[in-house]
Amino acid sequence: MSLTPLADALEIILDSVDRVPNPEPVGLEVALNRYVAEAVVAPCAVPPADNSAMDGYAVCSTDVPGLLPVSQRIPAGQPPLALAPGTTARIFTGAEIPPGADAVIPQEDAEATAAGVRLPSASEGQHIRRQGDDIRPGDCLVQRGQCLRPQDVGLLASVGINTVSVYRPLRVAILTTGDELRDPGKDELESGQIFNSNRFVLAHQVQALGFEVTENRHVPDVPATIAAALQSAASSADCIVTAGGVSVGEEDHVRGEIEKQGTLSIWRLAIKPGKPLAFGEVQGTPIFGLPGNPVSAWITFALVARPWLVKRQGGMLPVVPRFPVQASFTIARPGSREEFLRVRLVGQGLEMRAELTGSQSSGVLTSLSAADGLAVLPAGATVTPGDWVEVIPLSALWQPGFG
């Protein structure tokens, strides 16, 4: 089977999404990272009335300059009285402008005297935040499919909304394979064994997107055991994510069991790292079979599984930004696949450079942990210091609601 380019694989994978979860209402206290099922429009204006942008004195602009008596004091939250002609009102930031006033003079420009307050001239509308300057009734606050961030939740609260309709979180089952893997903190390593990082990394990648991990366990490299685990996961999850067992080795049994239990739509991508990726379904439940090497698993989840999961959740497809940065490294040998290099960004502005964070082996997590982004090299490309390369910020590949 030939290698599938990433763009082609994404088109096939995203086209397979045919439904979204049911909506449910939730309170704002638990709305973070949830995906909006219905667009929300503003029921009222923000600010709800003209208010003062600073501490000072509310005046009618035609009454100044001059010495004016103070007729009232208006703290924020207190309804004002109409401004008596020829007077001023002591007013504080956020307080409502009294009828009859059309300007605010900052307190530092005023001079208090025994007879009143001496005030300079003022222009109409000065230092006043107008009703609806921020939000007008009927404005769309959040769109359908938007992942709610803290600022979005605050926006809803600012217009008095305390519940929002969101989609039920996707249920994702995570299975890792590999007889050499042991859980940290539970087992002592013997010769030939390593600790299992994929089980933890993938769970947090899923949870960071606002989804639910229904099970997260390690499965021995036994075909019958893998088959049973896939069947169990398919019965309770919206999607299965596995790590390991999808390459061409004699102990790589996951891909074969996917084909036995369901169908395989894609196997092997034209990217580095991450070539041995499988996508298909088991008993009607979509499955992503990710490579077992930790960096490959992280990258293929971020580039391939994440867009599908977000679309299946009912979310707007995440935008993956790329921006040009000059390289401070050398890639002398052209590769046959699109390559994603772990880089650190150093410097600022036009002086910013991308440098490799260390070994680019697919099993080296330190270089991923130290990275700010992924430099994207097309197939056949070489790089010399000073060349421009496209960089994807790492934050765009795991933060919910990015884009």
Image (cartoon, rainbow, N blue to C red):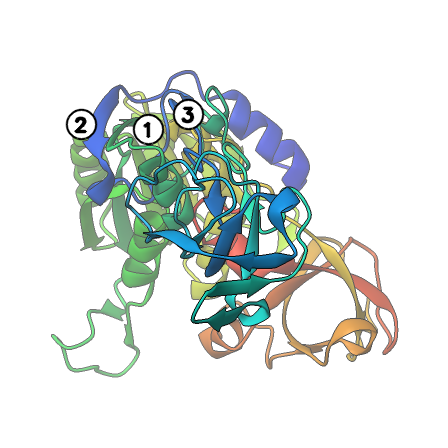
Given the image, on which type of amino acid does mark 1 rest? Lys
The image quarter containing residue 260 is top left
Q: Can see residue 376?
A: yes
| First-in-chain label (1 vs 3) | 3
Residue drawn where x is 46% and y is 54% of the image: 398
Q: Can see residue 243?
A: no
Is 83 situated above or below 64?
above
Q: Is residue 44 left or right of residue 86?
A: left
Q: Is residue 155 left or right of residue 11?
A: left
For mark 2, what is the residue? Answer: 235
Q: Is residue 259 left or right of residue 66?
A: left
Instruction: Name the secondary structure under disc 1.
Output: helix
Residue drawn where x is 83% and y is 73% of the image: 350
Residue drawn where x is 53% and y is 67% of the image: 362
For mark 3, what is the residue? Answer: 42
- For residue 54, the mark is none
